[in-house]
């Protein structure tokens, strides 16, 4: 099934330009996310990924361009109205209230909640360890546990599109795997996911579609099956002409079906050339 066959886009971002003061952080970014997708934004430090996610959530005002959600223009809508409409973000760094308990943090997520299937009880079903530690302050929790609480807080708001900013930041790979294990249940509940991930291997494991940013520009777009390691490296690091070419036609199918798993390991921020 093609992307479009799943219906109209849930999110449609057109020609977004965003400045932080004098700095042009995004230079005409477009992206279309269809229901049920896991859309990954990849790119090195400072590429503009978080700025894009935060602008979609309403936390930055674009200089120009538009953001449509479920067919309606939400470019000027306040962040809390977007949250109530179903655009909910798990911010980089989690931004929990450290002096509040786990359950109190989850309750905060319900403040601008839509009606829907996600309750605090369902979050405890997703992360069973939480139930018996619901009275513990989140300041006393590990990074991975805090990240799970941040995800739970977002789920309690019953998003239609969940924006995940750098879930893996500062966490050991085994913890990252555990956190991403929640994704199938989140998708099954009808939530669409737009995520930012510096760890390309991780992004490619979960994404149905990806876009690479570099210094505020789109350098690559396609499905994981369409892009080669060389194209991703060029787009990520900005080396060579492939970095400028949007993927418009699929590369030949991988005969042994192992291509993506065999190619992506090793391409992490630590292997940046610059
Ligand atoms: P990272 O993975 O390091 O978070 P990123 O791809 O998410 O990188 P952004 O955080 O969006 O990139 O940053 C894009 C550019 O905008 C960078 O040059 C950054 O320094 C700058 N920037 C981001 N937020 C602000 C801000 N609030 N004020 C000023 N400049 C900012």
Image (cartoon, grey):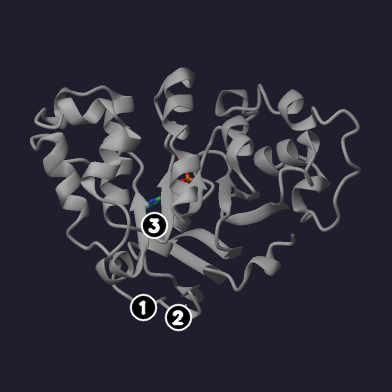
Residue 253 image-quadrant placement: top right
Distance from disc 3 to disc 1, alpha carbons, whole Å, reads: 13 Å
Residue drawn 11% across the image and 42% down it: 104
Residue drawn 44% across the image and 52% down it: 189
Circle on res. 73: 2
Residue drawn 70% across the image and 68% down it: 5
- Marks 3 & 1, CB-CB < 8 Å contact: no
Residue 180 seen in the current view: yes
Q: Is residue 34 above or below residue 273?
A: below
Q: Is residue 212 above or below residue 77?
A: above
- Marks 2 & 1, CB-CB < 8 Å contact: yes
Residue 200, position in %: x, y? Answer: 61, 34
Q: Is residue 76 above or below residue 58?
A: below
Q: Nearer the viewer, residue 36 or 138?
A: 36
- For label 1, the SS is loop
Residue drawn 27% across the image and 31% down it: 146
Q: Nearer the viewer, residue 142 or 111?
A: 111
- For label 2, the SS is strand
Q: Is residue 244 above or below residue 30?
A: above
- First in sequence, mark 3 or 2: give its number: 3
């Amino acid at each position: 099934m093609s992307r479009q066959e799943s219906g109209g886009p849930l999110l449609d971002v057109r020609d977004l330009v965003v400045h932080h003061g004098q700095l042009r952080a995004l230079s005409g970014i477009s992206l279309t996310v269809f229901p049920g997708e896991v859309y990954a934004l990849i790119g090195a430090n400072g590429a503009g990924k978080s700025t894009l996610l935060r602008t979609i959530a309403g936390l930055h005002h674009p200089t120009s361009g538009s953001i449509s959600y479920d067919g309606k223009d939400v470019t000027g809508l306040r962040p809390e109205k977007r949250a109530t409409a179903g655009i909910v973000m798990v911010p980089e760094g989690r931004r929990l209230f450290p002096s509040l308990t786990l359950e109190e943090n989850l309750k905060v997520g319900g403040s601008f909640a839509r009606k829907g299937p996600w309750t605090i009880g369902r979050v405890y079903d997703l992360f069973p360890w939480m139930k018996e530690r619901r009275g513990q302050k989140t300041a006393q929790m590990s990074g991975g546990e805090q990240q799970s609480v941040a995800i739970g807080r977002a789920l309690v708001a019953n998003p239609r599109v969940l924006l995940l900013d750098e879930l893996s930041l500062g966490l050991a790979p085994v913890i990252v795997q555990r956190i991403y294990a929640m994704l199938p249940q989140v998708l099954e509940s009808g939530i669409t996911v737009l995520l930012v991930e510096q760890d390309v291997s991780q992004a490619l494991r979960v994404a149905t579609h990806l876009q690479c940013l570099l210094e505020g520009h789109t350098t690559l777009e396609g499905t994981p099956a369409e892009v080669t390691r060389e194209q991703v490296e060029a787009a990520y690091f900005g080396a060579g002409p492939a970095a400028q070419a949007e993927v418009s036609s699929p590369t030949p199918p991988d005969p042994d079906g192992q291509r993506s798993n065999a190619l992506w390991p090793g391409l992490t921020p630590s292997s940046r050339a610059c």
